[in-house]
Amino acid sequence: MVTIADYKGKVKPDWCPGCGNFAQLSAISMVLANMGIEPKDAVIASGIGCSSNMPEFINTYGFHGLHGRLIPVASAIKWANPKLTVIGYGGDGDGFFEGTQHFYHAAKRNIDITYIVSDNQVFGLTTGQASPTAAMGMKTKSTPNGNIEKPLNPLDFALAAGATFVARAFSGDAKHLQEMIKLGIQHKGFSFIDVFSPCVTYNKNNSYDYFRSRVYKLENNDKSDLLGAYKLAQELGDKIPIGVLYQKDEKTYEDYDPIIANTSLVEREPVKITEEHLAEFL
Amino acid sequence: MVTIADYKGKVKPDWCPGCGNFAQLSAISMVLANMGIEPKDAVIASGIGCSSNMPEFINTYGFHGLHGRLIPVASAIKWANPKLTVIGYGGDGDGFFEGTQHFYHAAKRNIDITYIVSDNQVFGLTTGQASPTAAMGMKTKSTPNGNIEKPLNPLDFALAAGATFVARAFSGDAKHLQEMIKLGIQHKGFSFIDVFSPCVTYNKNNSYDYFRSRVYKLENNDKSDLLGAYKLAQELGDKIPIGVLYQKDEKTYEDYDPIIANTSLVEREPVKITEEHLAEFL
Amino acid sequence: MKNDEVIIRVGGAAGDGVQSAGLILARVFSRSGMHVNTYNYYQSIIRGGQSWYQIRASHREVRSQGDGLDVLIALNKDALERHTNPKINEGGASPLPKEGVAIMDSSMTGYKEFDVDYTPVPLGEIALKYSKNTLLKNTVAIGAAMGSLQMNFDILADVIRDQFGKKGDIAEQNVKAAKEGYDYYSQKYKKIKKDLKVSNEKRYLIAGGEAAGLGAATGGLKMYFGYPMTPASSILHFLAEHSTQYGVFVKITEDEISAINMAIGANYAGVRAMTGSSGGGFSLMTEALGMAGMVEVPLVVYEAQRAGPSTGLPTKTEQGDLMQVIGASQGDYPKVILAPRNIEELFHLTREALNIAERYQMPVILMVDLYLAEHYETISKPDLEFKIDHGKRAQDNQKDYRRYAYSEDGISARAIPGQPGLMHNEDSDEHNEFGDVVSDAETDPTLRTLSMEKRMKKMETYAKEIPPTPTYRADDAEYMVVQWGSTQGAVEEAIDILREKGLKVGGLEIFHIHPLNRDIEKKLSGRKKIIVVENNFSGQLNRLLKSEFSIKTELITKYDGESFYPEALSKEIEKKIGGN
Amino acid sequence: MKNDEVIIRVGGAAGDGVQSAGLILARVFSRSGMHVNTYNYYQSIIRGGQSWYQIRASHREVRSQGDGLDVLIALNKDALERHTNPKINEGGASPLPKEGVAIMDSSMTGYKEFDVDYTPVPLGEIALKYSKNTLLKNTVAIGAAMGSLQMNFDILADVIRDQFGKKGDIAEQNVKAAKEGYDYYSQKYKKIKKDLKVSNEKRYLIAGGEAAGLGAATGGLKMYFGYPMTPASSILHFLAEHSTQYGVFVKITEDEISAINMAIGANYAGVRAMTGSSGGGFSLMTEALGMAGMVEVPLVVYEAQRAGPSTGLPTKTEQGDLMQVIGASQGDYPKVILAPRNIEELFHLTREALNIAERYQMPVILMVDLYLAEHYETISKPDLEFKIDHGKRAQDNQKDYRRYAYSEDGISARAIPGQPGLMHNEDSDEHNEFGDVVSDAETDPTLRTLSMEKRMKKMETYAKEIPPTPTYRADDAEYMVVQWGSTQGAVEEAIDILREKGLKVGGLEIFHIHPLNRDIEKKLSGRKKIIVVENNFSGQLNRLLKSEFSIKTELITKYDGESFYPEALSKEIEKKIGGN
Ligand SMILES: Cc1ncc(C[n+]2csc(CCOP(=O)(O)OP(=O)(O)O)c2C)c(N)n1
Ligand SMILES: Cc1ncc(C[n+]2csc(CCOP(=O)(O)OP(=O)(O)O)c2C)c(N)n1
Ligand code: SF4
Ligand code: SF4
Ligand SMILES: [Mg+2]
Ligand SMILES: [Mg+2]
């Protein structure tokens, strides 16, 4: 039996005390353990940012790559070895600025990976600039006179891109967070989970209290209703929904491609090239 | 008075006979002339692709840059000199693959430029690979067994990104195309026009006939209705709407930023740095 | 013009079928057991403009597009005038000489005449008998050209049938049209005097991009990620087309950044994967290239150069990306750069690159150029046997596993996700032997130094296994011509020309670009002059050589978008020698 | 430890206020008319870990972080033990010597003791009298440190008031707390013996990134585009903060690719614009850099190196990106690379870079490193006068305008969108004088060659105006130490040490990296030994020098993430000299 202890990394997380990322670390460990997935069969690919340090602190296979580029890495890992549970974990700067393009196209392709974003509305690791989800007016080092850019709406984005599982969670609600991650991993296809994850050091606006007083859990919403999901995604004022906004059963990219459908390339032998293959050059 | 002759470039367009891009070249020239914009006050920034060769063939200021990067170039030109009419012109590969990220964020910023995409569902210049808007099943050099990727919906994308003017036109309907381009240029904010522009050489599926038998002109649609626009954007079967799907009055990025609001940086003298500025280092 | 070889050139506009006509001709020669070398001169335009395709064939090796011209097939007036004009301006191509024949449609008139043998053939008229498809004219012209050389018509007929085979009737129409062209020429005009020997040798006609793709497949490639860009598209198209046959997953990604990161992800997961692009796309890949070096993931990148800078001349050749590839990505990290000299070598080095990358767990860049990637050559039967070397792999549940264990050779055992008991983190941040980051809570300057040395030690280990640098007629050479990559053929032929003149010239051929083999210095020492030949502006390899070895060199460059021609090159070398 | 300078080090965890304490101390010295040089040792972690900040001050110039340590302020036990341990492992930093004093909270106990002077001060107790803010402890410690040197307390009080000024009461609490610390130390412990001279000179305390931003603003910069990345963020933050004051538009873009393309668009439109990043972000910019060279748009890129490869050590210094910058982008195109040696030069070269870029219509890369970008130095009053040179500009309605007219110096007159009668196309494809593409319908090898030469001619023209390469104590030097960029201070101080030992050592200081000034060869010739010192693994400048000049060199490198220390460096140089 797999237990959460199996997932405990030997390096102590060095996030600031109180950082939202701790909740995600526990939740991911817990969910993987509860799902009976062995550490050897899980891969966490991350970008660069405080959040992206995650693979250093968990006992799975980890790939801590480049800022904004976790999605292509995660996608190819899944394509190479479908037996792995592949999780992408990164920040809002990572995913919604530098990596926007990859996020969009991976969602459109419906690749069977789970993409979790630690959305703290700032660039944490680079000491607190406004991120793409930062509110208008927010003062940071990069926006000393207040942010003048409309925030990006990650859920709306994921829906438009064609993600087949779109959810939101909150670091301050561990149980619900676990639930979302579990559903995301169980979903076959591209799962996106945006997690409100307070940065206690650089974001005094979007604190635990800020979110706690606003979030409410979705219940009985029609997850197959795309337009409904779009509407829910717009709720970002006094009431903000958390939960699964949208879910759809759809063929994955892997299902379509004959070379990788039902095949584990890492196990399959390379095709032996023979003289017959050469005939076309004669 | 400005006439279309003023816009005639000295280099003869070298697109294949019958290529959709000819229509856009005429339309842009015509509209600029009719709007009384002098060639010196228009800039066309493009990427790389058959379509992106446009600035070579028109007598304006032209910037034929990099594949996928016309949007940042065009944005900065506008910010540097708001008196210019700035048009971005490129292909579907250029804008919806390599340049996805820039397109998204420029639309979100509502920069006052007009972005016209010559959407031919293939990579023309690189001899006909499947583009992001290519239909499922389409056979090309890159997809000899048929395309297995869901096509990207450019209008949906633009709406989700927050573009404040979203329209579609068709190279086969010159007058309507002109109308769209004119409205796009007149619109203050980010205008996006997706133009069905047949590639007669590499795309035998999406021909003039294909589009001609499908497109219908939008009339009396409520342009302020975002959800309605989303719905229209989904019509891609036997009936495909052309026209303005969505338009909204909204402050531009330029309006928000105190340094460029109501200022032409290219004309303004640099601020003289004085001893007072140095005091903070003492 | 040499008696023992023939050069045919087909000229016309883009969209006229110039290249497919050329390829049919090339295949006739290869099926005749001859050596073939082709050259494609084309523009970044889909229809119109001017392009041409040249086929050089002989019973002896032909190592470049060659000098001279025997038969011109002019598909339009412009082509006719262009290639018969002694002042032809196409980067060094020879005009049709007096003895040469110009095949063109009989209806062509009013062209500027030069001193050549015009041999009009009613191409259009003959073609119309069989079909309205204007491209059939080309087949008639091909027939005529084969007639001028009295090549075996049956072979041509076979080639045509294979080409148009799927189209049934069309194939037969083409065969008949070709036959009429063949006969028309044979009856009306004189045969060109050549001493060409056909043979029964099996020769494989293959383009650079195809050879790379085939080499990769025999080397265990299972995934290829790319974004189209001339001249890197040819390998992409080839692999896409052979995806099912070769069992290779091929994916066009949203951009080159995604392509390389996917290739890294796949290799990390234990599957041999490649990516490729040309200079501009490679620029976008450089960040990830350094990451591959840092996390020690195997990676092969196919870099196909074209004339730069920037978008440059998309359909023209150059060796201008060496500095970019050498310098790619911030910081020092181990990498290998290979520059195959010809198509056969490209086949071999591609799979060898896959082995090196995996054995050393580092990026290997295969540098080709448009010329090498897109032209066709005949090669003898490729050796399909190849030992895939996965390098050091960790045992399942290995105790105290250290992904980046410091070792004698710098190489540590890899663990692949899914292997039990070897979980670890691969990190683009600096890390210790376990993969734990040493730049977060406490930077450790000592460990940092050790990790840096651990990675770079792989370069030392690798340096020991670089094959000797090949030479050409070098034993008694007083003058050494140094070349790299695809210019081998032209340089060797230029050397042959100079040798015939009695000049003691030899060649040094560098195909392992980084690290450089130390034998280079020795092989160049004691010569009267060292002349470096490069198809770029600034002499990029020359700079590299000088940074590594104490040598004095002279430089010959060409940067007009075309590759070297042996004759012209030999004159330049002679000048350098003369200027003693 | 020298009598005429003082070194204070503040050690603690990230988030403990180490850097702001350090800056207060630095400002006290600069306000005392002294020279100051600071060093920041920190980790890529937001809270926790171990970091320290060092201030070196003197009435004479202090050109590096220096050797030795006089006063340690230990904000936690780890810091105390780390810096008093003679085996300190922080990249070369000196431990606290016997004569040094260690200021720490009186409550600190159980630490490992070494042979230094512990001077506990009830930091927490005193602080608590005024506020619950734990950071007030730091102010008490600062007071104590100033007491140990008997610096003028009024100046400290002023600095504190300026620092906490906006917070009214808080400022006074801090002043009082500092005074108590000052008095406590003065009464209880001995004053450190130093012969420090204060003066009335105005000294400006400024960090590298600030100097670059200020220099750019005085050089007519109007737009800055960037994406945060250590250590390039400091210029970005500085300009953002001063945006209104300096009239500079600052934009964080979605990525670095957008940033550089925007900077190019702005410059094309006639507005001085810059972008900047560190190595990883710069990788992503390389494609556009080549485009700027091709379309001949002025562009200045601020490249701030950190320890690589890949993500590497994000908060550590290195000079490891030279090969990347030299090779950036495919093909050959003109560009200039500058590497300022110190903060004052960074100020000047930044605006000079803007002029060069516009005069030559080509990219200029300013290479700094984390050390230079982030440390503070005192400089004398910056000269605010500067002549902005827009270079050759076309006249409105100029007849027969050729954007890329071939010319003697390679430079042609620019037209800015909006100018009447000068419409043209700027193209990343190869083009002729008018900007018309020569790679579409008909490639013209001749025009291609001319255009290539036209652009590269700018390098020749520029080469004539490179300032002479500076030397240091070189006249009679038998041994020459060659350095580039930010290592100037440490190298000069190392040379001074060796000179005092009677060794005839001098320095050559390269700040124009590309193209290299030909005077380098002359200045190095006839020396017994040439020793190249670089803060990277492979000796990247060394490779460059050897590729350009026939010289024999030896190499000293450091790649542990920290910059050179003069004393240790002098020993390495001595060893190289010894090994004659
Ligand atoms: C190409 C590149 N650009 C910039 C950086 C610098 N960088 C490191 S982390 C980061 C942003 C982090 O923000 P986010 O992704 O939101 O993660 P967080 O720290 O908030 O969890 C940036 C810009 C980088 N490492 N690489
Ligand atoms: C970075 C980079 N990648 C790839 C290319 C090669 N390339 C040139 S045009 C093109 C695609 C053209 O397709 P599209 O944008 O749809 O334009 P079209 O030719 O169809 O008008 C590509 C991939 C390039 N020039 N630069
Ligand atoms: S800076 Fe913010 S995001 Fe980063 S570790 Fe601290 S609290 Fe978490
Ligand atoms: S290939 Fe297609 S898009 Fe390109 S010019 Fe020809 S018809 Fe137009
Ligand atoms: Mg964040
Ligand atoms: Mg297209």
Image (cartoon, coloured by chain):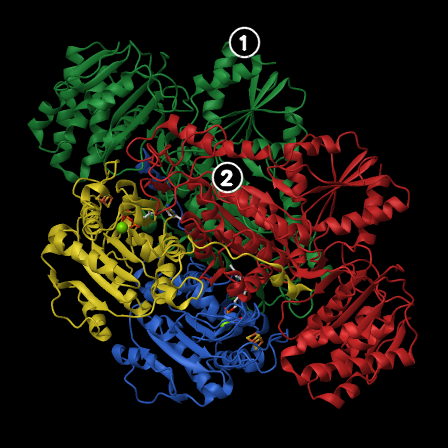
Chain colours: A blue, B yellow, C green, D red
- Numbered disc total: 2
Question: Is C352 placed left or right of B13 in the picture?
Answer: right
Q: Secondary structure at mark 1?
A: loop
Quarter of the displayed picture in which ligand 3 can be seen? bottom right
Measure the C-alpha gap from mark 2 to mark 1. Answer: 48 Å
Which residue appears at 29% of the width and 80% of the height?
Answer: A231
Which residue appears at 11% of the width and 35% of the height?
Answer: C169
Q: Nearer the viewer, mark 2 or mark 1?
A: 2
In the image, residue D428 lies at what x, y percent?
A: 39, 42
The residue labelled by disc 1 is: C502
Locate the N terminus of chain D by quadrant: bottom right
In the image, residue D501 lies at what x, y percent?
A: 91, 45
Which residue appears at 58% of the width and 44% of the height?
Answer: D337
Read off the chain for label 2: D
Question: Is C52 placed left or right of D162 in the picture?
Answer: left
Looking at the picture, does residue C90 appear above or below residue A135? above
Locate the C terminus of chain D by quadrant: top right
In the image, residue B272 lies at what x, y percent?
A: 54, 56
Read off the chain for label 1: C
Looking at the picture, does residue D580 appear above or below residue C356? above
Looking at the picture, does residue C15 appear above or below residue B44? above
Q: Amino acid at mark 2?
A: Tyr
Are dots 2 and 1 in contact, CB under 8 Å? no
Q: Is residue B150 visible?
A: no
Quarter of the rendering containing residue C384: top left
Question: Is A81 placed left or right of D31 in the picture?
Answer: left
Q: Amino acid at mark 1?
A: Gly
Looking at the picture, does residue C314 appear above or below residue C481? below
Disc 2 residue crowd, few under 14, some 14–19, many 20+, Cα 10 Å: many
**What numbered label is drawn on residue C258?**
none
- Of residues A247 and C204, the one drawn nearer to the viewer in this rendering: A247
The residue labelled by disc 2 is: D360
